[in-house]
Amino acid sequence: MDIIKKDKNLPLKLIKDLPVLPRPYARDIYLFSTHVAGTSHAEGIDGIVRGLKEGDELRFLREPENMHDELAIAVITKKDEKIGYVPRFDNPVFARLLDAGKLLFGKIKAMSKIGNWHKIEIDIYLRD
């Protein structure tokens, strides 16, 4: 007979209730510079770009079911707006890193408009 009643879900509850703390040795490792491809196809890109500035962080979202590129990596703003993709010729290594659970992100390096095309240059980082 157990004197202390055991709760089988206790370890899960403890883990779930922990606050999110910054990792003490986390660092951002610069990997590569490129541009965002396909911005001219992004819906509402003119309005989205008005809300962006140099230094803004961008998220990457893998799209393995993308019919044009199975290694596709969408580029997403903090407001969850898709602005384009990591260029196809740049994405094989980054797609594999994302698939392996690594945290990659982009930072806007420069922005310009050439005709109707918004050129958004980004640096890609690995948060380790």
Image (cartoon, rainbow, N blue to C red):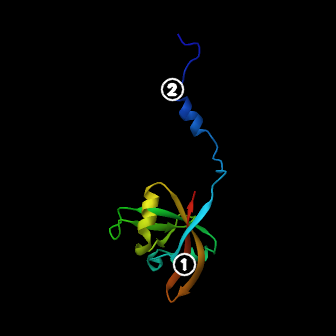
Q: Which quadrant of the view contains residue 50?
A: bottom right
Between 125 and 55, the one nearer to me in the picture: 125
Name the residue located 64 percent from the left edge and 71 percent from the top edge: 55
Quarter of the figure that contains the C terminus: bottom right
Residue assigned mark 1 = 120
Front-most of 31 and 17?
31
Where residue 77 appears, as percent x and y from the top left, is: 55, 67
Q: Which residue is mark 2?
A: 8
Secondary structure of residue under mark 1? strand
| 60 versus 112 height, above or below | above
Q: Residue at 48% across / 77% down in the picture?
A: 39
Mark 1, residues whose alpha carbon is within 10 Å: few (<14), some, or many (≥20)? many
User: In the image, residue 125 lies at what x, y percent?
Assistant: 56, 65
- Label at residue 67: none
Q: Looking at the picture, which amino acid does disc 1 mark? A: Ile
Identified at 57% across, 76% down, the residue is 49
In this figure, what is the number of numbered marks? 2
Whether residue 58 sits left or right of residue 92 in the image: it is: right
> Which residue is pictured at 55% across the width and 74% down the height?
122
Q: Is residue 60 left or right of residue 3?
A: left
Q: Amino acid at mark 2?
A: Lys
Label 2 CA crowd tier, 10 Å (few <14, some 14–19, many 20+): few
Tag 2's secondary structure? loop
In the rendered image, the residue lying farthest to the left is 67
Q: Compared to 110, does 92 lie above or below? A: above
Nearer the N terminus, badge 1 or badge 2? 2
Q: Position of residue 102 (x, y in %)?
A: 50, 56
Residue 118 % position (x, y) = 52, 82
Q: What's the CA distance linking mark 1 and mark 2?
A: 51 Å
